DNA sequence: CATTGTCGATTACGGGTGTAAACAACAAAT
DNA sequence: ATTTGTTGTTTACACCCGTAATCGACAATG
């Protein structure tokens, strides 16, 4: 079953699970409280939506659940990136980089990093 | 007034206007019918939402409207790209390129194009 | 035991989205 | 002049999203 897309808020909630898992709802809420300022209830709602979407699994530990991610962070990042690149740049990455460069969104270090990794791709 | 974000469907409808403008609702519907298969009504709904969002303007020509874009294609592309890169890659482009390279999303030509344009950035 | 706290589950609710159908006004055709 | 078609406008409606409040069950505490 293909995993459904997850929303931006759901992404914020699954992120701590990619760093450490399993975690309880309370632990996750603690980790996102700072950046998001959500109540525990909101985090629980987002968690159950993630479960419904097949992106997160849980296992009961006594009366509470331990959550762990079912999707990979990289898979999600690549899928979302491809969607955007397909839609906005006809599937090519160079126009994206060109536009960002034009708008000075690329730092010196970022540019150097891209050049380095592309160089390593060549046989 | 900051222009609101536009949805994916709205993007599909404004796209023909970036290629040629002004256009009537019927002309736009014709141009997207192929890819999207929407009825004229749907296209009109999306057009009026774009107008409400300040992304498209119209001018009455007799009984029908001539639409033209108010936002730039590049501005939109860059804004959406930045959002994604900020969210998924902490604002850096190199991890994006790295992930795509890893998954073989980058064609030979795409890689060459990126290298060329980055080289030209250097003073 | 009875109260209080805590869990997950259910319900809420306004706004956005995808996808139109219905409507009112006007023009074209008969 | 009446019918028919075409315009934009209004209304629809189910589903997703952000953001919870409420509820019923169980646990902890007194």
Image (cartoon, coloured by chain):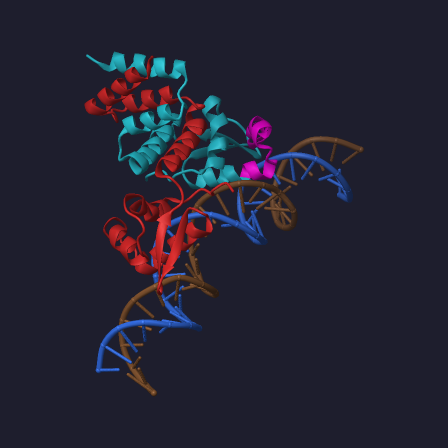
Chain colours: A cyan, B red, C blue, D brown
Where the C terminus of chain A falls, by quadrant? top left
Residue A43 in magenta?
Answer: yes
Q: How many marks?
A: 0
Viewer-nearest residue: A87 or C21: A87
Tell me: A61 left or right of A119. Answer: right
- Residue C24: where, in percent of width, then height? 44, 73
- Residue B119: where, in percent of width, then height? 28, 15
- Residue A118: where, in percent of width, then height? 27, 16
Q: From the viewer's perspective, is residue A41 above or below residue B49?
A: above
Quarter of the image for residue B37 reads: bottom left
> Residue at horizontal 50%, vertical 26%?
A16
Residue B77 in magenta?
Answer: no
Q: Which residues are magenta?
A: A25-44
- Residue A69: where, in percent of width, then height? 43, 29
Viewer-nearest residue: B26 or A11: B26
- Magenta-drawn stretch, dominant element (helix, strand or loop): helix
Viewer-nearest residue: A100 or C2: A100
Where the N terminus of chain A falls, by quadrant? top left
Tell me: A69 left or right of A45. Answer: left
Tell me: B46 left or right of A123. Answer: right
Tell me: B58 left or right of B118. Answer: right
> Residue at horizontal 35%, vertical 31%?
A81
């Amino acid at each position: 079953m293909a995993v459904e897309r997850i929303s931006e808020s759901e992404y914020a909630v699954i992120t701590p699970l990619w760093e450490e898992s399993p975690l309880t709802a309370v632990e996750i809420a603690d980790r996102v409280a700072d950046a998001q300022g959500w109540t525990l209830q909101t985090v629980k709602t987002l968690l159950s939506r993630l479960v419904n979407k097949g992106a997160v699994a849980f296992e009961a530990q006594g009366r509470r659940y331990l959550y762990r991610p079912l999707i990979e962070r990289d898979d999600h990042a690549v899928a979302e990136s491809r969607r955007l690149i397909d839609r906005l740049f006809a599937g090519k990455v160079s126009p994206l980089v060109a536009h960002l460069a034009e708008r000075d969104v690329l730092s010196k270090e970022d540019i150097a990093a891209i050049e380095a990794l592309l160089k390593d791709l060549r046989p």
